Image: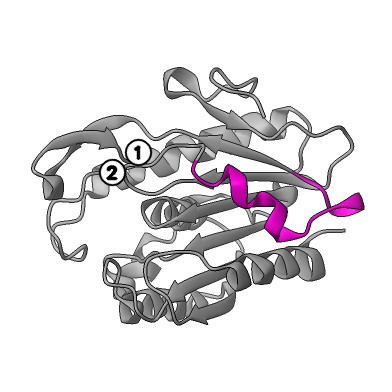
Amino acid sequence: MTRDPSPFNFGPEGGWEREIPSPFSGTVFMLHGLGADGNDFVPVIPYFGLEGDKTLRFLFPNAPVQPVGVNSGMRMRAWYDIRRPDVRIDPDWEGIEASAAKLLGWVEEEEKRGIPRNRIFLAGFSQGGLIVLAAGLSSPKPLGGILALSTYDPFPSSVPDRLKGGGSQPFFMGHGMSDSVIPYKLGKETFEALCAIGWEGTWFAHAEGHTVTLEELKGIGEWLCQSYLP
């Protein structure tokens, strides 16, 4: 692993990169949740079971440090502000859209390095999951796939109105049925809304709370290998 600054240009916020030899099948941008950083999901990569010709390059950007309303204005790494305990109330659309645009800028940078867009995957947990979904709605052409874990869209019924991109996005969503941070029902409604606009979805439910389980990580690895990697 390399520490800040990453060889990939994440800008002043920095991030981490999983160094692997070429050739590799594609690139995954993995976005952390509220208050964490890009190093948060580095340890889970071996559990995906990717090896041989299924090897992926992982990039772990850092969110900017900013005040978060729901946490009494404390400054922490956040992809957007959360103003109310109920994430459906008064969402920070400006912050969400800015982070999604930044992510798509990194995708374009990776394309310039020679990785085709259909071999670039966006993954995120909680806050990071909302950003990868928002980026998918704005992407001008399909990505390799989107992995959105323990996350949501604030207004699933308005998803069709926010679709700016082109083509169907293959995506995987996982959610804990005991999640007390992001309601399971809201996650499932988000999944159904994205399927309704033509995205090709896989849903993974587990019994735990606001977390990622080992079985979920295994399911992600199988989804990547069986469906979207050469």
> Is residue 23 placed above or below 15 in the rendered structure?
below
Q: Which residue is mark 2?
A: 80
Q: Nearer the viewer, residue 113 or 19?
A: 19
9 up-or-down from 17: above or below: above
Residue 22 horizontal side relative to residue 62, left or right: right
Residue 168 visible in this rendered orientation of the protein: no
Q: Is residue 115 above or below residue 171?
A: above
Residue visible at 36% across and 52% down in the picture: 127
Q: Are marks 1 and 2 in contact (CB under 8 Å)?
A: yes
In the current view of this chain or complex, which residue is farthest to the left? 72
Q: Is residue 180 left or right of residue 222?
A: left
Which numbered marker is on residue 173?
none
Identified by mark 2, the residue type is Tyr
Task: Check disc 1 and report its element: helix, strand or loop.
Answer: helix
Judge by depth and name the residue closer to the eye, 169 or 32: 32
Neighbours of disc 1 within 10 Å: few (<14), some (14-19), many (20+)? some
Alpha carbon separation for disc pair 1 and 2: 8 Å
Where is residue 57 drawn, in percent x and y? 73, 40
Q: Nearer the viewer, mark 1 or mark 2?
A: 2
The answer to which of marks 1 and 2 sits earlier in the sequence is 2
**Element under disc 2:** loop
Query: Which amino acid, by three-letter code, is at mark 1?
Result: Ala
Q: Quadrant of residue 160?
A: bottom left
Task: Name the residue rendered at 48%, 45% in the picture.
Answer: 31
* Residue 166 in which image quadrant: bottom right
Q: 38 above or below 205?
A: above
Indicate the position of residue 12 as horizontal and vertical percent values. Answer: 43, 18
Observer-nearest of 171 and 208: 208
Extent of the magenta region: 40-56
* Identity of the residue drawn at 55% across and 17% down: 5
Q: Position of residue 30 (x, y in %)?
A: 55, 46
**Residue with the mark numbered 1:** 98
